Image (tube, rainbow, N blue to C red):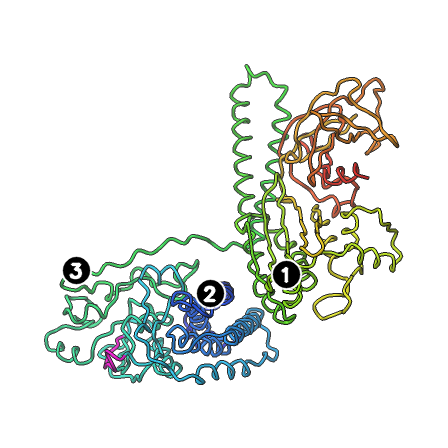
């Protein structure tokens, strides 16, 4: 960061760089929220609440950028604010071109903020084109007076949301006209802190005129102001630079009349400010301390020391005392993800230690060691509760992923000349943060594919008897211990004939007798594409194979269902988390394996003659009128057996990918929580195994990949 940022913002005494990260995060959230509201804006029936919400987001970013000295961001967002102010006043009618330039400006603001965040000193991208386009919108339409132009938010809204500056820089308030005010700011440790107030009047057109006047105290600055803005608007604006409790606004003429009567903001002995009763005329002008400011509710926010006098907070009217508004408690805190990962690793080690204690205590006499065993039972329960609580910290809603697609689809559909509605379902469904980060790119490929290859052009859809507007649906839901994410469209669907012809051209081994499911899986082959034209959007065949590879790396699966002419559905199934899971341990020979408990349906002892052998040595067992494939783990993993008389006679029914199989094991050892360790990063990928864990006795047990075992039975 350059030194000018600190000097212009903090005056040298307060280092604002400690608050940079908070600002960058809050600015990013405001830009994301603004983009979402712009995309959802109904241009025909846009209401005040929608337009004011978008305006507040732009204003919050502008105010913060000005505070920290990021002038390029402040300039651009100020222009955006000017356009949004005219829109919310209904002086101009919103249109798609305005939404486009505001979205592009939000992107540019993100880019500029990223440069400041990383300290990039290279040449900044030019925003002059955007500024010119926005200015054309602002000046191209004559302002139309509106009686409903002013919308004031109640204090509770302003505290909970980014602060608003209603009517600042707007057309003069007709019913009040220009007013002469005296504004006193102090006591301040450094009186020049108030210089930023004068800068605001120079930077914001229409705000009014300001000039500094003599003050009777060194730590107080006094200004004479001519403005049409309300006192509350000015207080909101000034709060970005000086705490509200240090600002007193009075009518200039009233102040003169009260001078001889002793009514004044700092009446009393010099150096010891006291707040005597104030005339009724002053009471509305001095708002109680409501916590307005850029960092309200943020960790590490600069605040006034408790020992410092707060004269404004004591001012009261004759009719009712002015009590400070209650500060809302922070609903969330920001924690580095590395700290959460460290906490999860420690809980994982605690789970292993608890399992070791539980195993070693099984041989103890309950009558002799009753107190110890009771303590171990409590430790087991508390460890499980702690693990669930810690894991929930990493779980975030799918709305975080879904929120990035409306903008992408809007731009893509516009480029392709298509009309698309985007529908989301199950946004509250939660997934582990580590998986969310890894699933975003595959989902982006799938959504782009639906828009480009799936949804037809409007004329083609009308010719096919469909609505000219296509629909792409993104949904998420929990199914057992997995999360299923689906991307659906009502487009043209997959062409079985076209895929088979393309596969034959590439020399793939295919036949007309292949099932639809097997044909659809061909599109995941590397470089496979049925697109007739290669565009900058897709058609090179580098998307779907990447999707499958990335999801397989997460122990997930991808399935396709399609009907030509009606649409296509891609289902992605993933485990909820990769860190800790409930498992059932089973013994085969001298080995112990872990089955994900979420996949286990039931277990039973096999009866003689219940297993039938069919063609090619495959085995089936009848379970309640349903025949299921039997998989002998002893043969799958080639486990040596030293007791030749022993045979596997316990069957465990597991379910994955919508199918069930029966696993043949020697014994059920119990249910326990296991810490999943990545086998591939520590050793190599092993077929039919998804990971490993450390048991209570220190031995390593393999966690079985039930999905792979089910697929094995199909072949």
Q: Which residue in the structure is indicated by mark 1?
A: 465
First-in-chain label (2 vs 1): 2
Q: Position of residue 494 (x, y in %)?
A: 73, 56
**Marks 2 and 3: which is nearer the front?**
3
Depth check, front residue: 388 or 88: 88
Query: Does the stretch in magenta take in 176?
Result: yes
Q: CA distance from mark 2 to mark 1?
A: 57 Å
Q: Tag 1: Cα neighbours inside 10 Å, few (<14), some, or many (≥20)?
A: few
Q: CA distance from mark 3 to mark 1?
A: 68 Å
First-in-chain label (3 vs 1): 3
State which region is magenta: 174-184
Q: Helix or strand or loop: what does disc 3 sit on?
A: loop
User: Hey, which residue is sitting farthest left in the picture?
Assistant: 261
Q: Tag 3: Cα neighbours inside 10 Å, few (<14), some, or many (≥20)?
A: few
Give the side of residue 150 with respect to residue 29, left or right.
Answer: left
**Marks 3 and 1: which is nearer the front?**
1
Q: Quadrant of residue 496?
A: bottom right
Residue at the image point whose x is 58% and y is 56% from the top = 401
Q: Helix or strand or loop: what does disc 1 sit on?
A: loop
Q: Which residue in the structure is indicated by mark 3?
A: 320
């Amino acid at each position: 960061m350059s030194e000018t940022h600190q000097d212009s913002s903090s005056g040298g005494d307060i280092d604002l760089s400690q608050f940079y990260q908070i600002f960058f995060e809050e600015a990013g959230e405001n830009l994301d929220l603004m983009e979402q509201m712009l995309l959802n804006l109904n241009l025909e029936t846009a209401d005040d609440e929608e337009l004011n919400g978008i305006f507040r987001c732009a204003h919050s970013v502008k105010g913060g950028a000005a505070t920290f000295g990021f002038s390029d961001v402040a300039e651009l967002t100020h222009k955006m604010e000017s356009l949004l102010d005219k829109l919310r006043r209904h002086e101009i009618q919103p249109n798609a071109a305005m939404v486009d330039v505001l979205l592009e400006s939000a992107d540019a603001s993100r880019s500029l903020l990223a440069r400041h965040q990383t300290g990039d000193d290279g040449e900044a991208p030019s925003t002059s084109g955007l500024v010119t386009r926005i200015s054309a919108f602002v000046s191209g339409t004559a302002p139309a007076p509106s009686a409903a132009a002013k919308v004031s938010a109640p204090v509770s809204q302003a505290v909970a949301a980014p602060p608003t500056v209603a009517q600042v820089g707007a057309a003069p308030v007709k019913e009040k006209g220009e007013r002469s005010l005296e504004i006193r700011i102090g006591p301040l440790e450094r009186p020049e802190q108030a210089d930023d107030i004068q800068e605001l009047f120079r930077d914001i057109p229409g705000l009014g005129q300001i000039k500094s006047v003599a003050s009777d105290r060194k730590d107080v600055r006094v200004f004479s102001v001519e403005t049409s803005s309300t006192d509350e608007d000015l207080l909101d604006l000034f709060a970005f630079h000086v705490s509200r409790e240090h600002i007193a606004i009075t009518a200039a003429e009233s102040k003169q009349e009260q001078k001889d009567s002793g009514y004044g903001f700092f009446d009393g002995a010099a150096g010891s400010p006291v707040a005597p009763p104030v005339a009724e005329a002053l009471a509305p002008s001095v708002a109680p301390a409501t916590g307005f400011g850029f960092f309200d509710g943020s960790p590490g926010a600069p605040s006034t020391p408790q020992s410092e006098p707060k004269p404004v907070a004591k001012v009261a009217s004759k009719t009712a005392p002015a009590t400070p508004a209650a500060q809302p408690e922070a609903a969330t805190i920001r924690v580095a993800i590395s700290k959460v990962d460290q906490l999860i690793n420690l809980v994982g080690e605690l789970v292993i230690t608890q399992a070791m204690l539980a195993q070693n205590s099984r041989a103890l006499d309950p009558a002799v060691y009753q107190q110890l065993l009771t303590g171990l039972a409590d430790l087991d329960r508390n460890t499980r509760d702690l693990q669930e609580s810690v894991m929930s910290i990493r779980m975030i809603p799918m709305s975080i992923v879904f929120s990035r697609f409306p903008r992408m689809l809007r731009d893509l559909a516009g480029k392709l000349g298509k009309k698309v509605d985007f529908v989301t379902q199950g946004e509250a469904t939660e997934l582990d943060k580590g998986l969310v980060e890894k699933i975003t790119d595959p989902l982006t490929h799938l959504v782009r594919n639906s828009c480009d290859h799936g949804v037809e052009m409007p004329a083609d859809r009308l010719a096919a008897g469909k609505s000219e507007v296509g629909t792409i649906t993104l949904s998420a839901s929990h199914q057992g211990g997995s999360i299923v994410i689906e991307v659906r469209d009502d487009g043209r669907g997959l062409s079985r004939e076209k895929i088979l012809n393309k596969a034959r051209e590439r020399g793939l081994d295919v036949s007309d007798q292949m099932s639809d499911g097997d044909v659809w899986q061909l599109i995941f082959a590397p470089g496979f594409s049925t697109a007739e034209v290669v565009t900058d959007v897709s058609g090179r065949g580098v998307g779907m194979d990447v999707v499958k590879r990335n999801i397989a790396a997460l122990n997930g699966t991808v399935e396709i269902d399609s009907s030509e002419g009606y649409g296509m559905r891609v289902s992605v199934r993933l485990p909820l988390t990769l860190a800790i899971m409930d498992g059932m341990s089973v013994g085969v020979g001298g080995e112990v394996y872990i089955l994900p408990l979420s996949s286990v349906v039931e277990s039973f002892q096999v009866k003689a003659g219940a297993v039938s052998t069919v063609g090619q040595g495959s085995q089936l067992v009848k379970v309640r009128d349903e025949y299921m494939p039997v998989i002998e783990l002893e043969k799958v993993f080639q486990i040596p057996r030293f007791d030749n008389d022993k045979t596997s006679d316990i069957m465990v029914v597991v379910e994955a990918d919508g199918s069930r199989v029966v696993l043949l094991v020697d014994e059920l050892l119990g249910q326990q929580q296991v810490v999943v360790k990545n086998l591939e990063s520590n050793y190599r990928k092993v077929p039919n195994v998804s990971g490993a864990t450390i048991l209570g006795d220190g031995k390593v047990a393999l966690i079985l990949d039930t999905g792979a075992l089910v697929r094995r039975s199909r072949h």
